[in-house]
Structures are given as structure tokens and as C-alpha cells.
Amino acid sequence: MKKQSRWIPAVVVPAAVVAAGIVVPSMAANAEVVLPEKTPQQVLELAASSSGASFSGTVEQTSDLGLPDVSSFQGQGGAGDATSDALELLTGSHTAEVFVDGTDKQRVQVVEDLAERDVVRDGDSVWTWDSESKEASHLTLPDTSVTEVPTALPDGTAVPQTPAELASALLSAVEPTTTVTATDNVKVAGRTAYQVVLTPDDPATLVGSATLTVDSETGVPLKVVVAAKGQADPAVSVGFTSVDFSAPSSDVFDFTPPAGAAVTEVPAPGTDDARAHHADGQAPEKTVLGSGWSTIVGLAPSATSESAPTSASSDDGSALLDQVLTPVDGGKVLQTSLVSVFVGDDGRVWAGAVDADALQAAVAAQ
């Protein structure tokens, strides 16, 4: 018999869910996987206790958000075009190699079509690298207790997340009003695992459910699947196809930009340099509307975007956006099966796991 308890995520980050877009081959429940019985809360506690684990493995990703086919435009933006790369991440398949050693050493490496993208952290030093655009960025963390690793390249392009990162976004927000159900035990990447399903009680959200699969021994999240209402196939799923729980070699976390790379030094969060960086328009101002599964996040345009010269790359990016955005009063809108995006005429971008009408109404009312 399935066990249930009542919870609600106070904050769900739709943009992070979209950027994660990771799916693995189907994983069938296995009646022969017999594990000590745990309640849903105990499974969530097991996952939360795994933050200091060490492991490495391969993550395969795909996303199915019901986006129109924009394959004929892929690559027209040129190297480093964030629009093209973002849509590719939302509609394509990717493989990432993941290395984690405790809380302050992580590496996510994506290799595709002779190009490589990396996010590497070693203690207080964090690097991002894109071999196609030959751009690197470096950040020195002021506090080594910070466990989050940047998931964007210097041009703003998102890097695929690991199951643990996506699970953390869910676990950090678990509170009463979502139904959490313990379901059948399974095997993922040869590991026995518990599963819990989080079903929102929020009628406004496009999220149908989120399934978290947790390694029975270490508690490390092995797979996360986010289903959209009314869609049979998963909208977002993150999972390992192979995993090794021995500590990776320390060499994995060493990174030096290749000769000729364009390197950007990013000011540490909370410093005067970072505040000046934001004031100059280099980072968008964030606004949050609502709460729970139907949270809406708004990003203001940077001050430099209006005066920046138009390039062939940005023209191609605009043409690509025109293929997926629908003109509406006050801007343009995109609704996927899981997330809606509204781009206002003022340049502000809003996103949330709600339908397009609800998104526009919330923006108009604020």
C-alpha cells in the first residue's frame, strides 16, 4: 500500500527546471527490488543527508516541452549565441560527465560535436568554459561553505544540471500542501533506489508531478522526473546511466584556460564590485511573484542591452525567437507544456510554471 503525507514546495524555480531538461531511457519498476521500508519523509531525509557524498558518472538528457521544431535555425546564431544554445538545450539530447568530491569540488562536462562546455569548482575557485566560443569566466567565492555551482556559461547559456542539483531545488522547498507518495523501488544505473512522487495541489501550475529516485545506500539522487499536466511523456527528467561512488581524482578539478581564451573575472556575490557590476546593468534585477509551484520570476533587461550594437548573431537570435514567440498585448509569449515565458515590450522577461494567460495576468497586476 502506498504511503502519503502532505507537503508543499514554497519555491519552485521554473527556469532552473527548464534549464535542467534531462531525460534518460525509461526506467521500469522492478518488483524484485526489496529494500527496508521507508516513509516518504524518511526518503526525503535520506536524500537531504547526501550532500557531502563523492561520486562520478554519466548523465544523459533530453527534454520534451512541446516546443515547435526550430532545428532549421540551429547554429545560425553562430558560436556563443545564447538564444540558439538555450533552445537547443530545451529541445535536444545531451550527455554530461559529472564529478563530485564532497561539498566543494564539482565538475560538469558536456562534450558534443567536437565542442566542450564545463563548469568546474575546486574550493573557492569556480571556472566556466566554452571551447566553441573560447570564452572562460572565473569566480572566487568569498565563503567556501557555498555549495551551489554556477550553471551558466559567460554568455548566459545554461549548463545541464545533475540529478542532485534539481533534487535540491525540490527538497529545499518541501512544506505542507503537496502530496508526497512513496512508490515502487527501482534500479537506476545498476543501483537499488527508493522513489517518491511529489504531486502539487496547486491547480494553477502546469506541473503534474515530480518523481525523485534516491540511491538506497548513499541517498544520492539518481534521477528526477518532472511531468507536465496532460502530457504522457516526461517534460523534464534527469538521470544517471552509470555512476561510481569512489572519490574522483583531484586532477579532474584542476582547470587552466587554454592559450587565447577570453577570460572574464566575475566579482564575488555580496561584494562592492558585484553591486557595481549589477548597477552597471551587467546582471538583471529579479522580481518574484506568487509562491509555491506557480511562482513567477521576472528579470529586468540590462542597461547595456538597449545601447549595444546589433550584430548578425543577435539578428539570428531574434529570428529564432520569432519562431517560438506569439505576439500579444504588451509583448510576446511562449507557452510550453511545463513553463510559460512572457517577453514584455520593455524588455523584461517573466517565466513561471503556469499557463500563458495566468502569467500575463500576474505580470499586468503587479
Image (cartoon, rainbow, N blue to C red):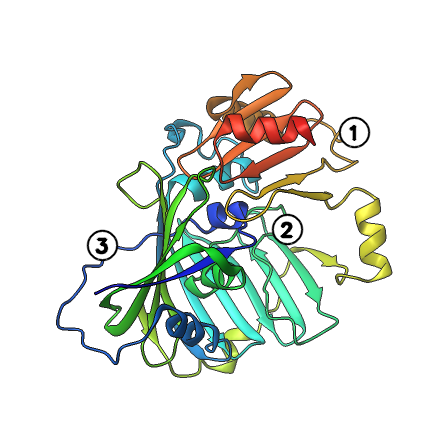
Residue shown at the point (79%, 62%) measured from the top left:
270
Residue 163: image quadrant is bottom left
Say which mark, if any, is on residue 307. 1
Q: Number of labelled discs?
A: 3
Say which mark, if any, is on residue 26. 3
- The percent coordinates of residue 212 (x first, y second) are 36, 62
Q: Is residue 363 above or below residue 20?
A: above
- The percent coordinates of residue 63 (x first, y second) are 37, 44
Q: Is residue 238 above or below residue 202?
A: below
* SS at circle 1: loop
Q: Which of marks 1 and 3 is nearer the N terminus?
A: 3
In this view of the protein, which residue sits in the foreground, 171 or 255?
Answer: 171
- The percent coordinates of residue 335 (x first, y second) are 46, 30
Residue shown at the point (39%, 32%) measured from the top left:
67
Q: In which quarter of the image is the C terminus?
A: top right
Left/right of residue 249 with respect to residue 310 in the rendered view: left
> What amino acid is at disc 1?
Ser
Task: Identify the residue position indicated by label 2 in the image.
Answer: 154
